Amino acid sequence: LEGCFRYHQKVFFDQGVSEQPAKMAKSKNHTNHNQNQKAHKNGIKKPKRKRHESKRGMCQKFLRNLRFSKKGNVSHEESLKRAEERKAKFAGQPAPVKL
């Protein structure tokens, strides 16, 4: 291929422009054809939610506060006991008047 001058493919070996013939430009850059149909073939499902999500990677400040707030919560039995104590405390007094 010495002295090759193929102008229609722009090779120009003598001037050192290119070793290979130039390729044609691409005409199509992107298509999303049929992707939506493929996605809906088995249905698009929501991700399954776990009952208790992991606290790994959560903010440490938040987790520390969460522990203290849980510690301060009152159990159901304790709340019933406190309600009975309140009833006994105000048993002899008249009911409050609503205006």
Image (spheres, rainbow, N blue to C red):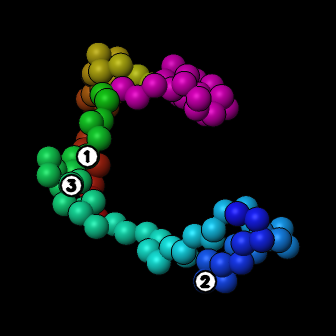
Q: Which class describes the residues within 10 Å of circle 3: few (<14), some (14-19), or many (20+)? A: few
Q: Distance between the residues labelled 2 and 1?
A: 56 Å
Membership of 4 in magenta stretch: no
Q: Using the rendered view, name the quadrant where residue 88 is placed.
A: top left
Residue that appears at 67% across and 32% down: 61
Residue that appears at 43% across and 69% down: 30
Q: Mark 2 points at which residue?
A: 8
The amino acid marked with disc number 3 is Lys
Q: Mark 1 points at which residue?
A: 46
Q: Which class describes the residues within 10 Å of circle 1: few (<14), some (14-19), or many (20+)? A: few
Nearest to viewer (mark 2 / mark 1): 2
The amino acid marked with disc number 1 is Lys
- Secondary structure found at label 3: helix
Q: Can residue 32 be seen in this view?
A: yes
Q: Is residue 90 above or below residue 8?
A: above
- The spot of residue 49 in percent (x, y) is 30, 35
Q: Name the residue under label 3.
A: 38
Q: Distance between the residues labelled 1 and 3?
A: 17 Å
- Secondary structure found at label 1: loop
Q: Which tag, 1 or 3, sits closer to the chain's start?
A: 3
Extent of the magenta region: 52-72
Nearest to viewer (mark 3 / mark 2): 2
**In the foreground, 80 or 1:** 1
**In the foreground, 75 or 16:** 16
Residue that appears at 22% across and 47% down: 45
- The spot of residue 40 in percent (x, y) is 18, 55
Q: In this view, does 51 lie above or below 71?
A: below
Q: Which tag, 2 or 1, sits closer to the chain's start?
A: 2
**In the foreground, 64 or 24:** 24
Report the side of 82 relative to 60 (left or right).
left
The amino acid marked with disc number 2 is His
Membership of 57 in magenta stretch: yes
